[in-house]
Image (cartoon, coloured by chain):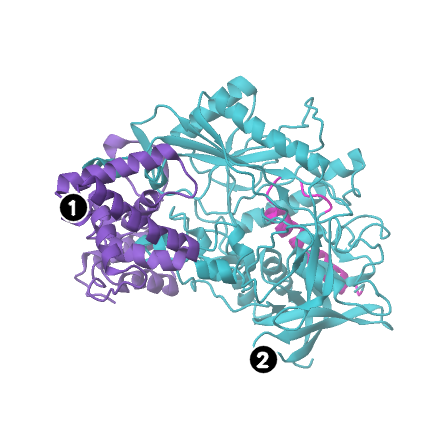
Amino acid sequence: MSEPRDPEMMRRREILRRSAWLLGGAVSAPAALAFLQGCSRQEPGSNKAAWVPQYLQAKEVAIVTAIADIMIPKTDTSGALDADVPAFIDTALLALYPQPDRDRFRVGVAAFADLAKAQGAGKPFLEQEPQARVAFVRQTLETALAAKTDPKPFILTVRELTLLGYLSSRVGITENMEYVPVPTAFHGCVPLSQMKKHVYWE
Amino acid sequence: MDSNSFDAIVVGTGMSGGWAAKELTEKGLKTLVLDRGRMVKHGEYPTANTDPWDLPYGNRITLETRQRKPVQSRTSYPTPAAQHWFVDDLENPYTEVNRFDWIRGYHVGGRSLMWARQSYRFSPMDFEANAKEGVGVPWPVSYDEIAPWYDYVETFAGISGSPEGIPTLPDGKFLPPMELNCVEIDFQKRISEKLGRKLIIGRVANLSAPLTHKESPQRGTCQYRNLCIRGCPFGGYFSSVSATLPSAERTGNMTLRANKIAYEIIYDNDKGRATGVRVLDAESGAQTDYFAKVIFLCASTLGSAFIMLNSTSSRFPNGFGNDSGELGHNLVDHLKAAGVTATADGYLDVAYTGRRANGYYIPRYRNVGNDKRSYLRGFGYQGRASRSGFGRFNDNALIGEELKQAIKEPGPWTVNASSFGEILPNHLNHATIDRSRKDKYGLPVLKFDVQLRENERAMQREMVSDAVEMFEAAGYKDIKVAKEDYAPGLSIHEAGAARMGKDPKTSVLNKFNQVHACKNVFVTDGSFMTSSACQNPSLTYMAFTARAADHAVNELKKGNL
């Protein structure tokens, strides 16, 4: 279990204390233990050093990393790279996608790089100016959305995985919205003006 | 009494088994309670408090799960957060003449841990329909007979809901209703004004307030996390593990044994009664016989059908209690149609707080009163309005700061509706034993031949067109009909394989869930259902189980069993 000074841990203790009070002290010992154990997991970024790509090759990782960073950059809140999205995509490809889909992703990365290079007068995507890279990602995305092909083109798959990885990460959730693990109540009609932040509902 | 002999044996610990265990032990019977799966005790829910970022792969169903659990993965449930509650299909195979989705959880508590908790009474109309329309056999039980038992189980379990005075959806003993959100209230008004249809908040087995009794001190109120499928450490919703089994345990009369696969009823020809059950140990493979005066089969509709079909003797060559030839037959589920979604304009300055594990309910209105359709029976809708989630970004072109900004805002309001319709009992829809295949334990498997027929097809079309009509009446935009992907079983409301009826020639069980031909065996899971109505069935299983247990103890006392 983490150090007690961990703010998340302290928040959990506070929530637990509050819910125990609400329940008239009826939180069972196993329930309390299970709840506190939730903070024994690794912090985001802690496995960054440990991550060795399992499926993607170094060149592919570089492209995917660049695209994820363009889609969800670091702004006033953390970006896709802070949330380890490239590692997420690499492991998700192996865990979630059947071989043909995985192969299509690989072919897609190569085609993306080839087209970027062709349009960039022979300059590889990763060496292009940031503005040119953003413009190319935007253009590829818009073309794919208009084409509506099935199966999904590479750029939409990498977008979906970037969003999934980011919006299931601690920083993606807690920095962009209000995550309340134990809401204790439901209120059906609340003015947004009374909410501190957009609430996490997923 | 030797160590293998008891007053009663309960096979299964799901919705029905938990109730049988509680009632029989509280009435003083030394009761052996068996489950084929592993032990689960209240609080032992491994993912119950896992934050979203601690679940792998964004909580998507993995390839490994799809390979080991291909049938379970026909639903959206076996995600990393919940897949441990769903069976390994490779170890537990069955044969499909036509696609049949058999969704199971083999562990103590069974599917009472994963259920959707929607709890509705059947109405007089539902109990009378078979007799009026000449479908199947008449129910041998009236609404008035079962109503006090609904009262009883609702009070113990804790059902949140609103009294509405709807004759076809009787009110019960409710805890306070949960709130509808602003768009649901708006939808309620519009469909009431334009179509005369009623929308109510769902009736759900979550504690919206403390229970009105002191029998379940381990349970607290619902915390609005909407993570029920993982098991609730607060005891916020009703399950066997959180509610009935702890009550049974406290009597001191329960012997609960996990990993015990009951596969045969032992029948004594001379005595003309069942004497016990034959059991395999799931871990060691050892075979043991357990004996009791009374046996409750609560192994789930198809689990109990299997045990009975597999129990042949000179008296019952075609399966236990199967003099009628109806055992395994008249299998039903609840009919689903393609889900419908739409976008609601406005209300952009309001949202909701908390995650409500419940939605709205639109009770059946087809073939009610003066409404007459080309098909029999009807359907109800369940759905919700919500600010749309992250999925909305997958198909738009926002990137960079614009996307980041959009992530920080709630999406537009979307409304969805899905429905459960009644499938007519039909002798042709059945399960038999396939002795050409064996499961992991060397037991033969079930074979399903269940099909949708004309009545279901006609109803299914209207389930979609009525939803579209309601959304149009409400002025919603972007109305989308999902791809149809229903096969019998997918609603996980399978029922009817050992129906009850007055006549032993056409039914397997009598009105007290007793096997007509062997009165000390009771079957109280979904298999007793003479017809299925369109309401979620668990509350009805609870009520009939409690009533059957009461009858069993009274009959034992009178020396009739």
Q: Residue B213: x and y, percent?
A: 50, 51
Question: Which quadrant of the view contains residue B346?
Answer: top left
Comparing B499 with A27, the one in front is B499
Mark 1 sits on what residue?
Answer: A123
For the residues carrying marks 1 and 2, which lies nearer the camera in this image?
1
User: What is chain A's hue in the picture?
Assistant: purple
Q: Residue B334: x and y, percent?
A: 63, 43
Horizontal side of residue B127 vs B161, given as left or right: right
Residue kind at label 2, given as amino acid type? Ser
Q: Quadrant of the C terminus of chain B?
A: bottom right
Label 1 Cα neighbours within 10 Å, binned few <14 / some 14-19 / many ≥20: some
Label 2 Cα neighbours within 10 Å, binned few <14 / some 14-19 / many ≥20: few
Comparing B129 with B148, the one in front is B129
Marks 1 and 2 on same chain? no
Q: Chain of mark 1?
A: A
Q: Are marks 1 and 2 in contact (CB under 8 Å)?
A: no
In the picture as drawn, the residue positioned furthest to the left comes out as A129
Mark 2 sits on what residue?
Answer: B284
Q: From this viewpoint, is residue B378 visible?
A: no
The residue that appears at 53% across and 66% down in the rendered structure is B250
Q: Residue B56: x and y, percent?
A: 35, 58
Q: Is B379 within the magenta?
A: no
Q: Quadrant of the N terminus of chain B?
A: bottom right
What chain is the cyan one?
A: B
Horizontal side of residue B173 vs B480, given as left or right: right
Q: Is residue B73 above or below residue A134?
A: below
Comparing B54 with B38, the one in front is B54
Comparing B530 with B400, the one in front is B400
The residue that appears at 24% across and 48% down in the rendered structure is A172
Residue bounds of the magenta highlight: B530-559
Q: Give the secondary structure at mark 1.
A: loop
